Amino acid sequence: MADYDYDVLVIGAGPGGYVAAIRAAQLGLKTACAESRETLGGTCLNVGCIPSKAMLHASEYFDAAANGTMAEMGIDVSPKLNLDKMHAQRLDAVGGLTKGIEFLFKKNKVDWKKGHATFLDAHTVKVGDETVTAKNVIIATGSSVTPLPGVEVDNSKHVVVDSTGALELPKVPKKMVVIGGGVIGLELGSVWRRLGAEVIVVEFLDQLLPGMDMDVRKEAAKIFKKQGMELRLSTKVTGCSVKGKKATLTLEPSAGGDEEKLEADCVLVSIGRRPNTDGLGLENIGLELNKRGQIEINHDFRTKVDGVWAIGDVVPGPMLAHKAEDEGIACAENIAGQTGIVNHDLIPGVVYTWPEIAGVGLTQEEAIEKLGDKAKVKVGKFPMMANSRAKTNHEPEGFVKVIAEAESDRVLGVWCIASVAGTMIAQATQAMEFGATSEDIAYTCHAHPTHSEAIKEAAMAVQGKPIHM
Ligand code: FAD
Ligand code: NAI
């Protein structure tokens, strides 16, 4: 240790990096964390999970007041939007949480090194004007928006924006075109639709939300259409011109065909994110990227270079904050000589629209492919319409689907569309982590009346005998 300034230097203070730094310090390792942003918390706290949820939550209230849901419950209101205040509460949430990480760094004695970090060699990193040496370096540099050739983002003009620009639009656009019907497009498209924009989602594939269970993708499309979103599936954007405050997009069928023009006051580019490795000096340590621009690691989070580790969005796997956090903890524990493990088969995914959409484990299609035969997979479905709490709360949309291996009854995947699907999926993840069968879930006592009872009933449906259907 005497040879190095630190036991651990983490590059990047997002949910992967800041959590890794805190865990390393808790384990008695002398730790620093380099961050080029002015505030800690990375994409998630500054321009991702937290500000998007602040806008989703606030716009959900507005929508419930404006679309008649509150009136159905005997609350007559005529809401008036104060967008400045809505943005202020978003910034408050971000400010409070990023300051909170600063407090946690001080409490745990993690040194924050401000500036962009570049490797000079595997144990020496330049951060701004300072040179820091460390026995172990964890790369947790995260990801940024994937650009779309021909569609230039300029957040300052509020016409063609990425997710960061779409979080801070100063007024509600009349017509918003979202390029990419994935998680960001649907969450931020929902925010502005609820606040009054006409929203058109252009998606290259023939369904929204790639990677999710096909039943869920189809049901989600129906729900979003019913809410007033226009979906242009199997369509690609081939160009964009901007004149003043208007954008004109050129669209084409994904398979090729006649071009058409589409005008918009705002265009959101949300076609995915790519790992941040530019300017990191990976060439100085001989670390090469894979074809997707990611840093490859082994199960311990070690890269091919001794003493250099990597976690979060910059490595393969879903680009999710909780995946980055769990990897951060496990990586720090491995550096400290413990056994840090992440079960990458059970990373839940949640889309925070209304209703929420969540899943964990295999889709039905993946389960059939993996087991090689449709008959080897059992599925139980239960509609939220038949769940007493959802029905009482005027939340009838959606369902729960439990997928199990026919022979062993072991649960392989759970998918939910429900107002609180993001919370419900935690119990499914935990059950699957413990190797539950659908019978285990079906015979677990669930509090009544709760949305979670729909998971129990879907598990009963796998057994062939739900009560309320
Ligand atoms: P990041 O959070 O990207 O942090 C990396 C940090 O490293 C950044 O702060 C960056 O400035 C810094 N950095 C990069 N290079 C250097 C360098 N060379 N030197 C110094 N610092 C550097 N995920 C969820 O699970 N739930 C959600 O609800 C959710 N919502 C999202 C909403 C939006 C709009 C977006 C864009 C993303 C959302 N995500 C969500 C994804 C989530 O934000 C990421 O998966 C998560 O932030 C990844 O964490 P990370 O630590 O790997 O990287
Ligand atoms: P995404 O990968 O979720 O969706 C991108 C969509 O764009 C896909 O459906 C894809 O088919 C489509 N697409 C790609 N190129 C296209 C083109 N040229 N024209 C039309 N459509 C095109 O990516 P997104 O939404 O940008 O999000 C990035 C990442 O951020 C995701 O990996 C996600 O994990 C993370 N995130 C997570 C959230 C959550 O957990 N709730 C919220 C927001 C982001």
Image: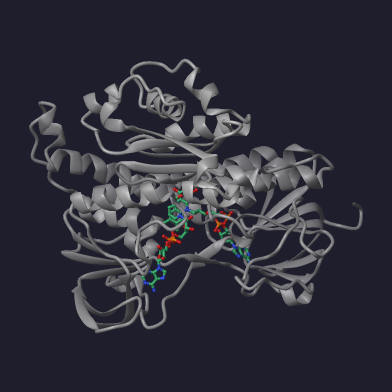
Q: How is the image coloured?
A: one colour
Provide residue 89's location: percent of width, then percent of height. 32, 45
Q: Front-most of 122 and 429?
A: 429
Q: Front-most of 132 and 20?
A: 20
Q: Is residue 245 visible?
A: no
Q: Front-most of 217 and 170?
A: 217
Q: Residue 451's quadrant in the figure?
A: top left
Instruction: Residue at 29%, 43% (x, y): give it.
Output: 354
Q: Is residue 326 above or below residue 256?
A: above
Instruction: Residue at 61%, 50% (x, y): give it.
Output: 16
**The C terminus sits in image quarter:** top left
Instruction: Residue at 43%, 47% (x, y): give it.
Output: 50
Does residue 373 appear to the left or right of 311 in the view shown? left
Provide residue 333's location: percent of width, then percent of height. 76, 42
Does residue 161 appear to the left or right of 242 in the view shown? right
Q: Is residue 373 above or below residue 72?
A: below
